Amino acid sequence: MPGENLQRDQDSLLRRVWGSVFKGPIVPVDDRQRRRTVLDFLILHIHPPTVPVSTIRYTHTWGLGGMSLVLFLVLALTGILLMFVYRPVPMEAYSSILTLQREVMFGSFVRSIHHWSANFLIIVALLHLLRVYFTGGFHRERQFNWIIGLSLLLLVVLANFTGYLLAWDQLAYWATTIMTSMLAYIPVAGLWLQRTIRGGTGIGAATLTNFFTLHTTIFPVLFVIFMPWHFWRVRKAGGVVLPRQEGEAPSDKPDRANTIPSLVTKELAVALVLLAFVLVFSVLFHAPLDQMANPGMSPNPARAPWYFMGIQELLLHFHPLFAVLFIPITAVLFLVSIPYLKYGDDPGVWFISEKGRRMAVVSATVAFVVTPALVLLDEFFIDLPALMPGLPTEISNGLIPYLLVLGGLTGYYLLLKNKYEASKAEAVQSVFVFLFVSFVVLTIVGVWFRGEGMKLVWPL
């Protein structure tokens, strides 16, 4: 069989290298062949010797997992270079950034690469999560790896947030002030958690030290632990989920190709295109740097980083206890529970089925219309605390709208399930799409449609 011959060739190659490099009898190989084979051996530590041909098409995975790894390596390299100049002390942090940009050769370029790579990593990691979900790559033996992937996405966001403060400019200082202030609304442990992260009651030297340590030490160590674990779980599950069409039975013995060069050359091509894009983007757009942080003068509006603007937008519509705690916890529990809901496994088919695709389009359209409509209603027409003056705001502007949203989502789920005679998987996917598009809309509103005093404005 061709697949068995490929496997036997790879195994023979590895045995030869193992014996010549590490132990056993010396095998006469030249240096060039030795280096090439050792490199192959390292690559095959991550990948299996052969992979199904159907899984290496660009349009199946879009190379998003590999792109995340490339961006992480770029961030690690540029971060090390930046540490040679950066000084994590409030009175020197901002001036060290100026020195980096004005006096160090290619310093501004390196900082721009680091900045944009960090932002691109959030987008690429999120798209990778969506690709896994919409191709059903979270069933059975892949269930726990979904949880690891969610943890990695959270690490990416937190690493970005801790790095955001290090520039010590107005944008970073007040964004950190806003985000850490939200912690105070968490019952019982909120103030303690806020003081622990800040290193005191306010944003100062201790905060910068904490964020610098988290950004340059703790989070990189966690990445080094979780990323290989994530890759190993993918390999243990037999690689990425096999693509197939609706109604097509899963193939027990798909056609296979050598990992080297069939898969590796495509991964290398994706990596080179990504690197070229990041480099060109960093040349055209410099990393932003506002004036030095001034604790006595807040910008108007004071904004969170763009990846937290959805939560900041929720604060304008819900009581902080629900915007900061209950709604995010509900969303996280929903995401964590997705692989463990009891519905039929149907991995490899994009959006589960043709019906699932139609329902996803409907949900995206509904969310794109309903979410801004609710924002406008709450902004200009509805004031729940004024309508219920005798109730605490935790109830009138927190519990009641929260229950209304949960009730609306439950009703929407049942409506779709009955209207389309949909399976549980298709209906859950529709709710997932609705929530995701709604959060994207809230983020867009917060970033581009909020002006002074966080009032709605037309961006142009």
Image (cartoon, rainbow, N blue to C red):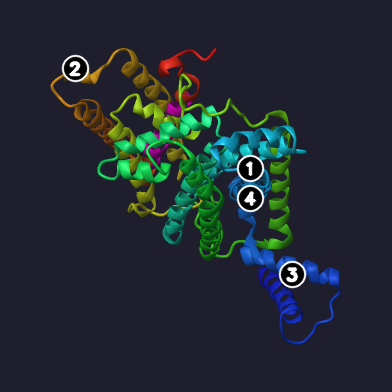
What amino acid is found at the position of numbered circle 4 in the picture? Ala
Rendered location of residue 328, percent (x, y): 35, 39
Left of 43 or right of it: where is 68?
left
Nearer to us: label 4 or label 1: 1
User: Pointer 4: what residue?
Assistant: 76
User: Pointer 3: what residue?
Assistant: 38
Secondary-structure class at tag 2: helix
Q: Residue furthest bottom?
A: 25
User: Pointer 2: what residue?
Assistant: 387
Of the two numbered discs 2 and 4 on the same chain, state the one appearing first in sequence: 4
Left of 244 or right of it: where is 418?
left
> In whole angstroms, how far apart are the C-alphas of marks 2 and 4?
53 Å
Position of 428 relative to 458 (above/below): below
Q: Nearer the viewer, residue 78 or 212?
A: 212
Query: Which residue is found at the position 62% from the left and 63% from the top?
Result: 46
Query: Which residue is found at the position 47% from the left and 31% from the top?
Result: 175
Nearer to us: label 2 or label 4: 4
Span colored in magenta: 429-444
Secondary-structure class at tag 1: loop
Q: Which of 168 and 304 is in front in this view?
A: 168
- Residue 406 within the segment the image draws in magenta: no
What amino acid is found at the position of numbered circle 1 in the picture? Tyr
Q: Do the residues labelled 3 and 2 touch (CB within 8 Å)?
A: no
Q: Mark 3: give few (<14), some (14-19) or many (20+) Cα within 10 Å.
A: some
Query: Which residue is found at the position 45% from the left and 53% from the top?
Result: 146
Secondary-structure class at tag 3: helix
> In whole angstroms, how far apart are the C-alphas of marks 3 and 4?
24 Å
Rendered location of residue 317, percent (x, y): 32, 24
Of the two numbered discs 1 and 3 on the same chain, state the one appearing first in sequence: 3
Q: Mark 4: give few (<14), some (14-19) or many (20+) Cα within 10 Å.
A: some
> In whole angstroms, how far apart are the C-alphas of marks 3 and 2?
72 Å
Q: Is residue 43 visible?
A: yes
